């Protein structure tokens, strides 16, 4: 007896699933029997027969026809029904997709990013396969807030609607593509029974439904490329926004928008939007500090704002005081179910075990950024291995690439989280060993690098070093400056006094070429403290002389420098250290000259020359140059010329005893002093030529500030010689260098000279403009020298020299 079936409404052809069910029952097969005979799974058969899938793929259809024993017209009808099912599209309802979400009401500081998204929306109608933009950034940086606000603002560009799905990328089990596509297709009003069973078919249906439409799709909180690739609205006129903590670099034809923490002003504005503008207006400094303590991270700032909003009796300063304690800051940044730490934990859980170790161990590095070499020391891994794990951390936005390729840094709050993980997951001994390894590496490497700049460090010194060249050593000292400085402070606190002293002594000659770039007074003061802790009077005298130089020469603190050199002289005399007595007297001569006491300066320097029994490069040449400088100041420039010319001759005589760095640098300094002596005799062209030689030598060595200072002196000499065009060219070249904050004084001097050149050329308007800018700098600086220059500028051409 045959089975009768209800297979669709009268007048309608049966669907493919209904044919499968009809023929299976006619053949008296169970789903399991048919699955075994055809190779099509029981689940797939069930989806077909229940209408959840419209058709099978061609090979599966043929396998089913064979298993069912179909032939002739019955087989043809069966295969045709499958083809029709694969081609058939469900009819969307009049409402195609949902309305856009509301905008985040207090979004601030994202104008540039919104402009990028507006341009992407404008490109969508002319871009085949639509436009895809990934919003990438740290946990808590506001990716979703930006995406939802953009969707609201761009609603007019996408009249066919908005679709959104949370992909739960940070969960232990992110949303599978099949489940995400099911949500998207339901959002397009596809009946559940018409949604295909496989991801490939679902994705094809999704894209076919978007063809000819303008829809914005938000794929929020994505896990990886494999998850989002089937979900992208690959149709002309559509825009897909993806938010993810990883870069999703494998996506084809995607654009990326990297979200950074807010600027402090924008973060303060966010606090005002949440807690009230009156409170921020009443405590602007506290609001700015609050933003900085939150790392300007929108989630942290929002939490802080919420805490203030729900505690109207709190001042901003009170909350700031709570957040200053790094050990409790993350705990304090919570409000209701919003917690900064939770955002970081979600990303941390998805790391590989090795990347987690690297993440927490990098927290022992004392400076703000680092490279793979230092990361290898902190972790005990090989450089290639640690570099691969760093890449994983960067992809997860738990680390960020620094401004220099190969350098990396934490966001401030993520660094605190990494320290928490270090304390929680490793015992104190392991952490202490990692810290010790990093500090020792930084100090020992810094000592080795610095010693390569000693005048007597010749080629064999470089060949025996870990550095391939002096340039490489210099690059390391520059790149790791914040780290070795922090390591020096830590070493003093932990009783590593000998290393602190050795580092300070090793960097003395290197400091000559980095006068403005680093706080040498701090480096040498730490050395003095360590020498005293060791009870080493000889080291103390040496480092007091270095400290005095840093104070008067680098900082302009003449009295502070004088005090340090006097103390060094007393100690050196007491212990019979002739060398340090010589240096102290020479340094004191320079300081006294700066204090306007040239005769006393000459007495000190002549005593230094009489004591000097050191070799030429290790000090004698420098002290004789100081003598020439002082002789010029006391009105004896002819004698000064003889001294500097003898020094230049000895520079050539002893050339083979010094490295090329010292030779070039010392010649530049001597030519600069020679130029001063020549101009003091009235030989302006000769002085300009000497300054030009010094300038060239400094520039060749990479000392742009020193070279620019020589350019100012050269310009002044050419002005006195009546060569106004050459003078102006020199001074303008100097201004191109004197732009940072650290060279404002030199800029004022160059501007003052340009005013004189303009006066001489009867360019009154230009002279006035130079004079006004120079006066503004002088007034801002407020130093004695600046005020003196300001008086001369106000006096006009006749009042200047």
Image (cartoon, rainbow, N blue to C red):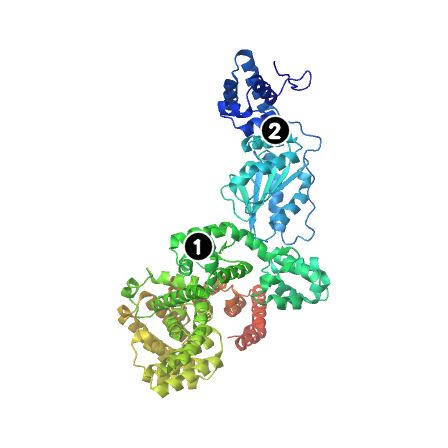
State the mark number for residue 52.
2
Q: Is residue 634 visible?
A: no
> Dot 1 lies on which element?
loop
Tell me: residue 728, above or below residue 124.
below
Q: Nearer the viewer, residue 404 or 742?
A: 404
Q: Is residue 400 left or right of residue 315?
A: left
Q: Nearer the viewer, residue 41 or 655?
A: 41
Q: Is residue 180 visible?
A: yes
Q: Is residue 47 left or right of residue 628?
A: right
User: Gap in Å between the C-alphas at discs 1 and 2?
Assistant: 52 Å
Tell me: residue 316, above or below residue 613.
above
Q: Quadrant of residue 436?
A: bottom left
Instruction: Give residue 35's position: percent from left, percent from top.
Output: 52, 25
Pick out the residue farthest to the top.
72
- Location of the N terminus by quadrant is top right
> Dot 2 lies on which element?
loop
Q: Quadrant of residue 566?
A: bottom left
Residue that numbered label 1 is attached to: 406
Q: Is residue 390 left or right of residue 643?
A: right
Instruction: Give residue 763's position: percent from left, percent from top.
Output: 56, 64
Q: Residue at x 27, y 71 (%)?
A: 654
């Amino acid at each position: 007896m045959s089975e009768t079936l209800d297979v669709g409404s009268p007048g309608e052809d049966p669907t493919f699933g209904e044919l499968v069910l009809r023929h299976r029952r006619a053949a008296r097969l169970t789903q399991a029997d048919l699955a075994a005979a055809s190779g099509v799974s029981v689940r797939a058969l069930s989806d077909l027969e229940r209408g959840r899938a419209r058709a099978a793929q061609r090979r599966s259809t043929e396998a089913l026809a064979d298993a069912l024993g179909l032939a002739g017209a019955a087989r043809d009808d069966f295969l045709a029904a499958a083809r029709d099912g694969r081609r058939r599209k469900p009819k969307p309802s009049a409402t195609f997709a949902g309305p856009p979400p509301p905008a985040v009401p207090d979004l601030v500081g994202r104008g540039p990013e919104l402009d990028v998204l507006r341009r992407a929306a404008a490109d969508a109608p002319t871009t085949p396969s639509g436009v895809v933009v990934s919003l990438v950034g740290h946990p808590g940086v506001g990716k979703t807030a930006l995406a939802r606000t953009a969707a609201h603002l761009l609603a007019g560009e996408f009249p066919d609607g908005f679709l959104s799905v949370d992909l739960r990328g940070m969960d232990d089990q992110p949303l599978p593509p099949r489940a995400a596509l099911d949500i998207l297709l339901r959002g397009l009003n596809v009946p559940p029974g018409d949604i295909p069973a496989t991801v490939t078919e679902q994705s094809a249906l999704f894209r076919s439904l978007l063809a000819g439409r303008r829809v914005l799709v938000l794929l929020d909180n994505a896990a990886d490329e494999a998850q989002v690739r089937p979900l992208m609205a690959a149709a002309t006129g559509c825009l897909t926004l993806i938010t993810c903590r990883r870069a999703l670099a494998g996506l084809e034809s995607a654009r990326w928008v990297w979200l950074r923490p807010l600027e402090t002003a924008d973060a303060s504005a966010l606090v005002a939007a949440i807690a009230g503008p009156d409170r921020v207006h009443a405590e602007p400094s506290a609001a700015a500090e609050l933003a900085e303590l939150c790392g300007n991270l929108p989630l942290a700032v929002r939490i802080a704002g919420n805490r203030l909003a729900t505690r109207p009796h709190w001042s901003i300063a009170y909350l700031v005081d709570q957040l200053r304690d790094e050990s409790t800051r993350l705990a304090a940044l919570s409000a209701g179910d919003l917690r900064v730490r939770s955002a970081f934990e979600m990303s941390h859980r998805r790391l590989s075990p090795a990347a987690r170790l690297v993440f927490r161990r990098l927290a022992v590095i004392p400076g703000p950024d680092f490279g793979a070499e230092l990361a290898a020391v902190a972790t005990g891994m090989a450089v290639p291995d640690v570099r691969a794990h760093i890449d994983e951390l960067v992809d997860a936005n738990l680390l960020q690439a620094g401004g220099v390729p190969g350098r990396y840094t934490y966001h401030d709050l993520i660094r605190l989280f990494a320290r928490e993980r270090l304390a929680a997951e490793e015992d104190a001994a392991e952490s202490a060993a990692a810290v010790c390894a990093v500090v020792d590496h930084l100090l020992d490497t810094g000592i080795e690098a610095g010693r390569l700049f000693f005048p007597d460090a010749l080629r064999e010194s470089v060949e025996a070093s870990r550095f391939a060249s002096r340039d490489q050593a210099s690059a390391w000292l520059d790149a790791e400056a914040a780290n070795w400085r922090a390591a020096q402070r830590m070493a003093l606190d932990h009783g590593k006094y000998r290393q602190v002293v050795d580092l300070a002594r090793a960097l003395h000659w290197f400091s000559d070429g980095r006068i403005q770039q680093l706080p040498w007074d701090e480096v040498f003061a730490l050395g003095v403290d360590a020498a005293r802790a060791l009870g080493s009077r000889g080291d103390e005298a040496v480092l007091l002389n270095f400290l005095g130089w840093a104070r008067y020469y680098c900082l302009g603190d003449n009295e502070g420098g004088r005090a340090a050199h006097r103390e060094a002289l007393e100690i050196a005399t007491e212990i019979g250290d002739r060398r340090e007595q010589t240096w102290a007297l020479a340094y004191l001569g320079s300081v006294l000259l700066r204090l306007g006491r040239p005769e006393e300066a000459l007495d000190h320097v002549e005593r230094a020359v009489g004591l000097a029994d050191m070799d030429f490069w290790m000090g004698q040449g420098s002290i004789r140059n100081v003598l020439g400088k002082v002789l010029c100041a006391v009105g004896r420039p002819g004698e000064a010329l003889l001294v500097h010319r003898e020094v230049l001759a000895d520079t050539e005589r002893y050339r083979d005893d010094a490295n090329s760095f010292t030779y070039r640098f010392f010649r530049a300094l001597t030519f600069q002093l020679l130029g001063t002596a020549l101009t003091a005799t009235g030989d302006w062209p000769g002085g300009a030529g000497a300054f030009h030689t010094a300038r060239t030598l400094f520039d060749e060595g990479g000392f742009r500030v020193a070279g620019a200072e020589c350019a100012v002196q050269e310009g002044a000499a050419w002005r006195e010689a009546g060569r106004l065009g050459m003078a102006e060219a020199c001074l303008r070249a100097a201004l191109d260098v004197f732009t940072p904050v650290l060279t404002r004084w030199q800029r004022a001097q160059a501007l003052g000279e340009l005013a004189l050149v303009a006066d001489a050329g009867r360019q009154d308007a230009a002279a006035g403009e130079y004079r006004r800018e120079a006066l503004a700098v002088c007034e801002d600086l407020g130093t004695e020298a600046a005020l003196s220059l300001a008086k001369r500028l106000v006096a006009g051409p006749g009042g200047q020299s």
